[in-house]
Amino acid sequence: MRSLRSWAAACTATALAVLATALSTPSAPAAATPMDRPAFAVGPAEAALGRLLPRHVSQFDLVPVSRPEAGDYFTVSGTAGHVRIRGTSPAVLLSGVNWYLKYTAKVDIGWPGDSTSKLPSRLPAPAGTIRKDASVPHRFALNDTDDGYSGAYRNWASFEKQIDLLALHGVNEVFVQMGADAVYYDTFKEFGYAPSELRSWIPGPAHQPWWLMQNMSGFGGPVTERLLEQRAALGSKIADRLRQLGMTPVLPGYYGTVPPGFTDRNPTGPVVPQGGWVGFERPDWLDPRSAMYPKVAAAFYRHQAERFGNSSMYKMDLLHEGGRPGDVPIGDAAKAVMNALQAAHPGATWVLLGWQNNPSTQIIDAVDKSRLFIVDGLADRYNGLDRETAWHGTPYAFGTIPNFGGHTTMGANTAAWTTRFEEWRTKPDSALRGIAYLPEGTGGNPVAYELFTELAWRTGTLDHQAWFADYAGRRYGGADPHAAKAWELLRTGPYSTRSGSWSESQDSLFTARPGLTATTAASWSPASMRYDAWTVQKALDELLQVAPALRTSDAYRFDLVDVARQALANRSRTLLPQIKAAYEAKDLTLYRQRAAEWKQDLALLDGLLATDSRFMLGPWLADARSWGSTEAERAAAEFDARSILTTWGHRSGSESGGLRDYANREWSGLVSGFYAERWTAYLDSLDTALVTGRAPATIDWFARDNAWNLERTDYPVKPTGDPFALAGTVRASLPAPALPGPVTGVDGRCVGVSGGSSADGTALELAPCDGTPAQTWTVPGDGTVTAYGKCMDVRNGSTAEGTVVQLYQCNGTPAQSWTHRSDRTLQNVKSGLCLHAESGGELLIRACAAGDDQRWDLPG
């Protein structure tokens, strides 16, 4: 009987622990009610730890503790071989493990790349007891677009790993849209729609994020009932796992999107036509004030709860990116949307994206602000923001979108994070309550993810340089002077880009639609370098010298490929102007030399990328095909997965809407099978034009690109080649880097930015040399002259003599293009005038005369 009673008691305790975990969904943003939470089951955290550290899981003791009123915390203590982590949720326990790994064991588990293979068999002891408290209660992750740009056809194993990495880095709120299509399908069958109508309205999975944001519908469809059920089952599994780890699944809310012809079927449900979105017709919007809206919303939330359970947070954005309110007062619409949410889920929080003019103050002021939470997508992009004033004290998260479209480019405004977050958090009357990591596509920029998520577990201004130095010491599982130098270069280059205009770095011209004047691949990406390219090239030099013992780590292999890829991508921005110059000079020999180099670089790039599956197209397409049970289903899924990377949509959206190549990325297979083929056709047409003296042949790029979308070509799914050898080949192929230095003129004085300011529009001046960054310039070879990551620019693009020369965000215009001539004058391409120093040191453009006041020596 004793053993039976013990067994029964154990079962009861386990049941209570599981129930406590299920009830421990983090509270809404403004909730300030003290809550001592009971102990929870640590099994889900232990299972995650077993997946992450299978060789060492037995050396960790995970201890649950109640969450105090002050919020989440963890402690790290123990002895060698026995590390004790105490924490306030399963996910927080994993965050404590991660802190131990980073700052005691000195290894890294990044997203992606890890160095856990360098852990000793017996884990080292922590130095005493370490405690870390969360500085903010809300640690949100994933953009509305993540499902489309990170892979709509991923399987459970992929999502399971993503959840583990989110928990490990302290995230506690995750947007989950997988399976939302099934909820809409279930809902609108109740309102007069046939299943076939709804399946035609719902887009293919890769395009569904923009349907859920009310931007478009149908493209990539129709979907099958089987696909809807598969996605719903996976979404349910994702939501359940998040709850098991004490994390909140943030689900899509209902704010009025309806299929075509809704009012015809439901006369008491008037709709507002939403017009177009970059070439697509938007779905209609059901007037939230109508008698029908609460009925649809109630059905939506009922079906959603049946499939995914309940949540305390629901994300929705009224009138996203140009939606039309018609005659509906926005405040009244917001009240109705909030009322429907509260009717279905009392106390729930409405999550909105801070983006462009969203959310409107008409929304904010119409509802209870304590039930709102804004995830700010622009916190590090623009300067001079005052969110407390703009959003009337609404709780919000400091957020970043360091990546658009899933681009493979490196970089982020990390220096802005380390100062701005703490300033905003601690200022009087601050409404900042969280962080929000919102790249449009995840799986790149591991250092950015690690730094950003760590902000939520620190107080005080973080030392940017020291943090990167520490990162370099653990990223590959051991300290190395060359790794340290490489990461210091990357810190000062792509990871110190300035806020003001952009939050991501420039994309690659290898992925751009062919053209001699191309400055960007995606329509809404930076048109020029946002940092000095030599920092990446020199970082590659250093990485190639890292000790052989550290080169075997997964993190090293990923970073080496990534840095070599970026160095080669940056080369595209200096090589293309050289091709253009040769073509315009009608120098056939030089043109062929430059064009051959471009093609060789593309082939080298593809070979480099083929060494790492995370840079390969094959797995992306194989994932898509795996969801189909028939040849037709597999073909539809593959088209969906291909088109999101290339044309994005139909001809109108791709061409007039500008969506083509929005999701460009440098992947093996995509480079060789798509980008290289395009460039070869284009460059060969220019060659023919030079030979024949005729205009180049016109190419219908959309037709060509869409033909590739419809192909069923197999691409490798397993990596091949030696990443170290190929990275070395990349380095050998690159010209000597353009090193920064002074631009000197008359009397040996230096060109500088007045007052040392990096603000757009700051005039340039000639002054005694002082070696400061304000007088440090780089000539990357693309016609620009840069300092502070910005360009020497003729004010307002003027061609008038006497116009001021200033510093301005690089934009790829001729007003920022200069030619250093044999007589040492620096001639502006647009105006044909030369940089001229006035007697007082002012720098203007004047007619070229080659006097002492127009002669310049450039660095490099």
Image: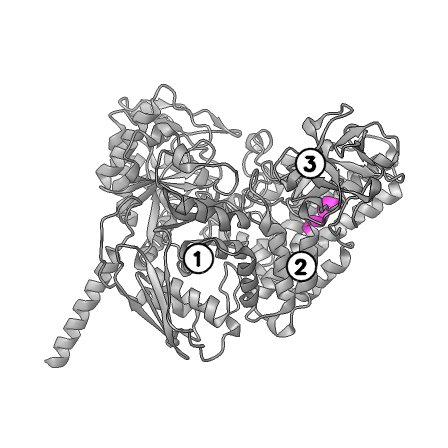
Kind of residue at badge 3: Gly
Query: Relative to 59, is 452 on the left or the right?
Result: right
Mark 1 crowdedness (10 Å alpha carbons): few <14, some 14-19, many ≥20: some
Say which label, 2 or 3, has the lower sequence index.
2
For residue 257, above or below residue 308: above
Q: Residue at x 33, y 42 (%)?
A: 314
Residue bounds of the magenta highlight: 569-574
**Quadrant of the rendered structure where residue 840 is?**
top right
Instruction: State the residue in front, 109 or 539.
Output: 539
Q: Tell me whether the residue at label 1 lies in contact with that at label 3, contact meaning CB atoms closer than 8 angstroms.
A: no
**Quadrant of the rendered structure where residue 815 is?**
top right
Query: Relative to 703, is 804 on the left or the right?
Result: right
- Mark 1: secondary structure: helix
Q: Position of residue 121 (x, y in %)?
A: 47, 80
Mark 2 crowdedness (10 Å alpha carbons): few <14, some 14-19, many ≥20: many
Dominant secondary structure of the residues highlighted in magenta in the image: helix
Specify whether residue 367 is painted magenta. no
For residue 42, above or below residue 429: below
Kind of residue at badge 2: Ala
Mark 3 crowdedness (10 Å alpha carbons): few <14, some 14-19, many ≥20: many
- Alpha carbon distance from label 2 to label 3: 26 Å
